[in-house]
């Protein structure tokens, strides 16, 4: 049997990364901050979005694209509060850019300040897919254990913020916020950390202020680049 070696001189995800960068730029020009939420199933992504929507009601515009393998239950939970579209992957363990784009087109919303993409619950695959987001946020809940940052480093390494949720359960479950934070920041020193209990609205104000600041930064960069042209 003969062998041939083919040298791939280009990153196999080159075109996907290029498209994601273009999408990021388009949303920045519209003034929309795109936030990709990653976590294992049940950590509280939808609850965090519900709490965020309640906190901002009437003050900031947000929309949600919510990914799941099956059902539109999360979209049903969100639509009484904000425009939301369910993205059903039919088995795929993560969202891709094409599906997100379809969801965005289906929303047909204008002047959106915050676009949240709730990824499929999974701490592995979503970490490898750029959805054109400006901010990647990982949600870790207290009952999952504080060892998860060290066990799933890529998800934490590629995120800019960590939300520790279900802190109301700290008296009942062995979990050290300090330990989880230390491990996560060892992997990603720039990681901003928020402790919340989404179900009760605890800590939501600082989380929302952080998002508002991130959008202001995006607008400032956008303004500076327009002034240069
Ligand atoms: N005790 C407690 N439960 C929560 C909290 N946030 C979410 N939950 C519960 O955790 C479960 C999963 O939440 P969900 O938002 O669906 O998680 P997702 O799968 O990441 O979107 C639900 O039963 C929520 O009511 C919280 O802050 N404290
Ligand atoms: Mg959900």
Image: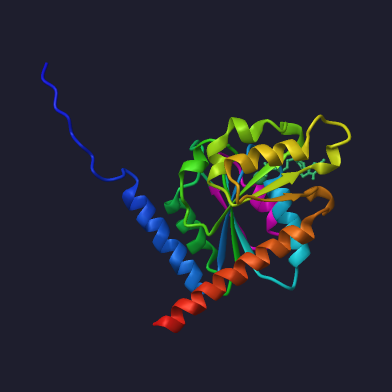
**Quadrant location, the C terminus:** bottom left
The stretch drawn in magenta includes residue 69: yes
Residue 116: % across, % down: 60, 57
Q: Which residues are magenta?
A: 68-87
**Displayed-image quarter of ligand 2:** top right
Query: Percent from the top left, x then y, of residue 19?
Result: 37, 57
Q: Residue at the spot x=57%, y=48% of the render?
A: 159
Which residue is pictured at 50% across the width and 46% down the height? 95
Identify the residue at the far left of this view.
2
Q: Residue at x 55, y 43 (%)?
A: 157
Residue sitting at the far top: 1
The answer to if 156 sits in the magenta stretch is: no
User: Is residue 89 placed above or below 85 in the rendered structure?
Assistant: above
Nearer the observer, 177 or 4: 177
Residue 98 horizontal/vertical position (percent): 42, 53
Q: Quadrant of the N terminus?
A: top left
The quadrant holding residue 150 is top right
Position above or below: 18 against 92: below
């Amino acid at each position: 049997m003969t062998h041939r070696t083919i040298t791939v001189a280009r990153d196999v995800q080159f075109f996907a990364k290029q498209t994601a960068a273009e999408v990021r730029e388009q949303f920045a020009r519209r003034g929309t901050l795109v936030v990709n939420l990653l976590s294992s199933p049940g950590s509280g992504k939808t609850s965090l979005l519900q709490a965020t929507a309640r906190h901002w009601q009437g003050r900031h515009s947000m929309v949600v694209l919510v990914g799941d393998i099956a059902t539109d239950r999360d979209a049903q939970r969100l639509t009484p509060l904000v425009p939301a579209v369910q993205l059903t992957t039919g088995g795929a363990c993560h969202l891709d850019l094409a599906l997100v784009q379809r969801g965005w087109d289906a929303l047909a919303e204008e002047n959106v300040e915050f676009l949240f993409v709730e990824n499929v619950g999974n701490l592995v695959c979503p970490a490898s897919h750029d959805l054109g987001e400006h901010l990647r946020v990982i949600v870790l809940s207290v009952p999952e254990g504080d060892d998860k940052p060290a066990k799933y480093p890529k998800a934490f390494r590629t995120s800019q913020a960590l939300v520790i949720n279900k802190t109301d359960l700290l008296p009942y479950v062995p979990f050290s916020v300090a330990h989880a934070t230390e491990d996560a920041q060892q992997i990603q020193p720039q990681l901003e950390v928020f402790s919340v209990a989404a179900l009760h609205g605890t800590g939501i104000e600082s989380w929302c202020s952080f998002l508002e600041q991130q959008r202001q930064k995006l607008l400032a960069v956008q303004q500076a680049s327009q002034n240069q042209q």
